[in-house]
Amino acid sequence: MSENKIPYKIYLSEDEMPASWYNLRADMKNKPAPLLNPGTGQPMTASELEGVFCKELVQQELDNDTAYFAIPQEIRDFYKMYRPSPLVRAYCLEEKLQTPAKIYYKFEGNNTSGSHKLNSAIAQAYYAKKQGLKGVTTETGAGQWGTALSMACGYLGLDCRVFMVKCSYEQKPFRREVMKVYGSSVTPSPSETTNVGRKILAEFPGTTGSLGCAISEAVETAVSNPGYRYVLGSVLNQVLLHQSVIGLESKIAMDKYGVKPDIIIGCAGGGSNLGGLIAPFMGEKLRGEADYRFIAVEPASCPSFTRGKYAYDFCDTGMVCPLAKMYTLGSSFMPSADHAGGLRFHGMSSILSQLYADGYMEAVSVQQTDVFAAAEEFARVEGILPAPESSHAILAAVNEAKRCKETGEEKTILFGLTGTGYFDLVAYEKFHSGEMNSVIPTDEDIARSLAQLPKV
């Protein structure tokens, strides 16, 4: 099909939507390292994990060999309320940049949560409901995951208890109110409501919190309340599995028009959207069927890939969760209270960490003020106000397109636009007023945290 016939927005029909999630691990020669029991140092068993997570989710978490998991019909029906999401050809951005590059983005913001997080939230809530549980607990950084899980639990009639990183709780009051609309309780973390919260507050007085803190509080709450389980919005294998619907839809749409991306870009915090976007393309690369360049973009304030260490570490600040082998800054690392709340996790998905260690991916870190400048340029040209997290991918995509202009290469770029920034206007206000700074941790800050890594 000729290029001029490719529409601005490519929509799939309901019949073209993926019927299964794709498990990238099945095609990985080097499988991600197993979760370890912090007490014994041995791989976590299904029975051990089932005390914290839903039973069927544990099976998905541990399965390194099954390539495809059928999406239950109830979840597929829910997906149809906002999926398939559009794949957009950024003609206006290309014209503005005067680049020979062709730019596409997969837009995941067309639901009330404003992000891709609903793809896994409804799946995890569904399995909790199927197990007969009363409710679930979770953490949220920027608030997209908490909002998405609140929506899913409200739909299925489950109780939902959210621990929201304190700086985001204060910066985004409207996001927390949306969670309450759907019936969730929202607590700023660290809090005085849990033992681990009180311990963290005593050790770090005045802290604005971190995802690691909030995870600790959510896990403690889940295991101390019968009929509850903990659910997580990123990092875990099961989450990347559910989010593969993003990449699967993208690939179906691009194949439909005979388009093959050269460069695939996603923002990286814990890894859910990046892992979901690249999944089927990375699968082709691993099987030797095609080649792509993958770029993970992270904030310079929390640079797990680019300045972290590949090692076993706790997933939470309170050190109550299993150990995961990942690129980490140390579970005690406290990132600055910047506005990319969803990217402030100290570690990275074990799947993505293994792929990065094996040389299948690249990673770059970018500064907050540069990210917001790119976000505004994108909003003015493409008409969507992007979330700060998504804007990391925008900046990298723009930089690659500018590089194509310099070299004359006609590369095709695909990036993930994970959500909208309408609940992030305080951040945009800070940027406009000149009050926004790009805080970068020192080598000493990171070394101090890494020195506390568990001895495994």
Image (tube, rainbow, N blue to C red):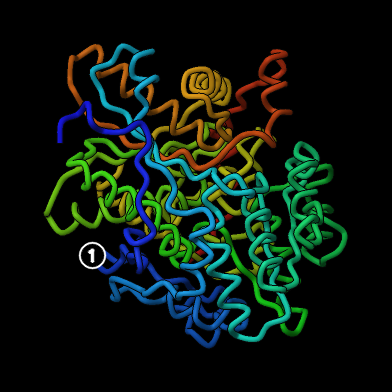
Q: Amino acid at mark 1?
A: Asp
Residue 190 as seen in the image, left or right of residue 249:
right
Q: Can I make out residue 448 in this image? A: no
Residue 6 lies in quadrant = top left
Residue 264 as seen in the image, left or right of residue 160:
left
Q: Can I make out residue 108 in this image? A: yes
Residue 15 as seen in the image, left or right of residue 52:
left
Residue at image coords 14%, 48%: 290
322, above or below 302, in the image = below
Residue at image coords 66%, 44%: 142
Q: Residue 77: x percent and y percent?
A: 50, 67
Which quarter of the rendering shows the N terminus?
top left
Residue 205 lies in quadrant = top right
Residue 64 lies in quadrant = bottom left
Q: Residue 264: x percent and y percent?
A: 31, 39
Residue most toward the right? 192
Residue most toward the left? 289
In front of the other: 243 or 82:
82
Q: Residue 115: x percent and y percent?
A: 56, 46
In front of the other: 253 or 166:
253
29, above or below 12, in the image = below
In front of the other: 84 or 177:
84
Residue at image coords 49%, 22%: 378
Q: Residue 148: x percent and y percent?
A: 63, 56
- How many tags in the picture? 1
| Element marked by disc 1 | helix
Residue 250 as seen in the image, left or right of residue 227:
left
Q: Which residue is mark 1?
A: 27
Packing grade of label 1 (10 A; few <14, some 14-19, many >=20) is some
Residue at image coords 33%, 48%: 250
10, above or below 432, in the image = below
